[in-house]
Amino acid sequence: MSVFFGSDLRKSWTLHIGVIMLLFALQFILPAYHHGNLARIMVLTCYAMGYNILFGYTGLLSLGHALFFASGMYGMSLTVQHLGWSAGPALLAGLVAGFAVALAIGLLALRTAGVAFMIVTLMFAQAGYLAALYFGEYTRGDEGFVIQQSFRQLAGINLADPTNRYFAALILFAICVFVSLRVVQAGFGRVLVAIRENEERTRMLGYDIHRHKLAAVVLSGTMSAAAGAAYGLLFGYAGATFASVQYSIFPLLWVLLGGAGTILGPFVGTLFMFYLIDLSSGLTTAYMLIAGFALVMLTLFAPQGLVGELRRRALRWLP
Amino acid sequence: MELGPYLILGLLEGLVTAAVLSLMALGLSLVFGVMRVVNVAHGEFFMVGAVLAWIIANAVDSHPAVNFLAALLLAPPATALLAAIADRLVLKRVAYDPERTIVATIGLLYIIQQVTLMTYGPDARPVEAPFNHRLSIPFVEWTESGMALYWPWGLGTTSYKLAVIGAAVLLLGAIWLLMTRTRIGLVMRATQLDSEMARAFAIPVDRVYAAVFGLGAGLAALAGVLIVPIQQAHYLMGHDPLLLSFIVVIIGGLGSLPGTVVAALLIGISDGMISVFFTPTLAKIIATLGVAFVLIFRPQGLFGRKGL
């Protein structure tokens, strides 16, 4: 990754700002159905980008990110539902919940590595999912609950309205893209990549591996929580399904498909997978079959993902 | 209401769980021990065993005992073959890289599960047990004339459940003999210790891996066939046993066979006991958190020697 060079840096900013402008323009062209889908995809991409910080850049494979997504979602929705908070403070509560959970999980899970790290994160997420079912009195378990339209107002803007919702999703998406870009271009991101490539050598160079990894978990978890909180607020629903194993697998799938360790990979992966599942669910109820095939084929033939392959073959400057 | 009879009931139910669980976890542990990979699709092989048992029993359509025997003889090898093919097509090509294998087996999990949903359907279907006598369990009480036996109401088990426990003990013994007393076991242990060196001594490591993966899946399928007369065959039934066998294998120490069996007993019996007295969800929360903390603070397991 040669983002040190000025021209590459400029190219990369142009590309990402261009993508955001394109998404802004699409708002006026797209038919209602795809318009709604794209808003969903942008929020879910933020989840995938959060996952990508940990998996793509730091090289830590977590199987429990649904816990962070659900922390954000429940942190937001439960304060709205049971404490009557308004959207602004509730969103903040979601972020704080995600931050706290990520910090706790990071401190515990980072004592392990490799396969043990994967299983530990899986187990914590499973415990979180079961806890959401156990406290069904508040969370209404798998059935979930609807967040009333009257609560979905931020600074006087009605977020239930499709246009406002699209812009809110776009703003969140833009924030996540810029945060990811800044992280990758800063020294911090380079240390993360160094840890991914060779942990021992990075340690020998004098970097505090544990603190960098912990920061990556917290950043990744908080970003996922932001996506979870926004998803609940924008689409007006919170349920335990979002805490299940399936939602831990999804970001892995999106990131793998789009390209781990690339900024736009999560977006490309989420976009493709969303429409693949959307189209196939019209044909069969067994739409997860597609996800399964995609996972196997990707690990076998394209471990770099779509954007990763593009970078390898043509655009070496892609961050 | 006395506590004693409930404890015995919990213990018996727990022993049945432990019997099935130990077979399944042994398969998972064997695969991890020899191949150093975690098979996330293991629960689906359990489910395939149960579903195949239903299909075979319906195809034979004779006396329940004949149906069940046919299922018991045919379903596990068929599942093992399926697993061996999956090993050749997928796992071998990712060179058994631990992390890529997990992602690939997650993919396999969804493929197997969803194909079952598309073909077998979403219904839960039972297979009739080959024999199923109700047995009442006596319990002691103090009467005026001293200690006496009585039969508390509702305290009972079936002959089939006892047979499951017996079958598991026999099978575990057979696996132990296979691993310690035969040439096949020797080859497996050699591959486990040092696959490079094994290859240098002309052991066909690739074929050993396919066989071990098949054997592991076959054990899971066997557990599935044994459980299907008690619990019906359903396309999502692999999920909970997968989680439980993960727990067992981790508590017992990954790759340690005696540890796996001890842990299966521990987990199975405590699961039986806990679910008699507490809600199953709370029990599962405690169990999953327990596993996470064992992995964090004692990664070699409670009985194992070496870590991951």
Image: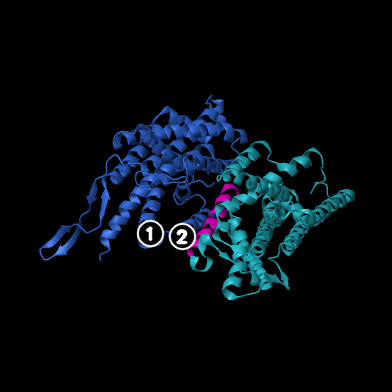
Chain colours: A cyan, B blue
A133 is within the stretch colored magenta: yes
Mainly helix, strand or loop, the magenta region? helix
What residue sits right under mark 1 in the picture? Answer: B274
A128 is within the stretch colored magenta: yes
Q: Is residue A280 left or right of residue A141?
A: right
Amino acid type, label 2:
Ile
Q: Is residue A190 left or right of residue A124?
A: right
From this view, report whether residue A25 is shown above or below residue B305. below
Few, some or many residues within 10 Å of mark 1 (<14, 14–19, 20+)? some
- Residue B62 is situated, as x and y percent measured from the top left of the image, at 31, 33
Residue B286, disc: 2
Q: Chain of mark 2?
A: B
Question: From this viewpoint, which residue is outermost toward the front?
Answer: A31
- Residue A149 is situated, as x and y percent measured from the top left of the image, at 64, 69
Few, some or many residues within 10 Å of mark 2 (<14, 14–19, 20+)? few
Foreground of the two, B269 or B75:
B75
Number of disc labels: 2
**Residue B38 visible within the image:** no
Disc nearer the start of the sequence (1/2): 1
Would you say the residues marked 1 and 2 are in contact, meaning their CB atoms lie under 8 Å apart? yes
What segment carries the magenta color?
Answer: A112-134
Residue A235, disc: none
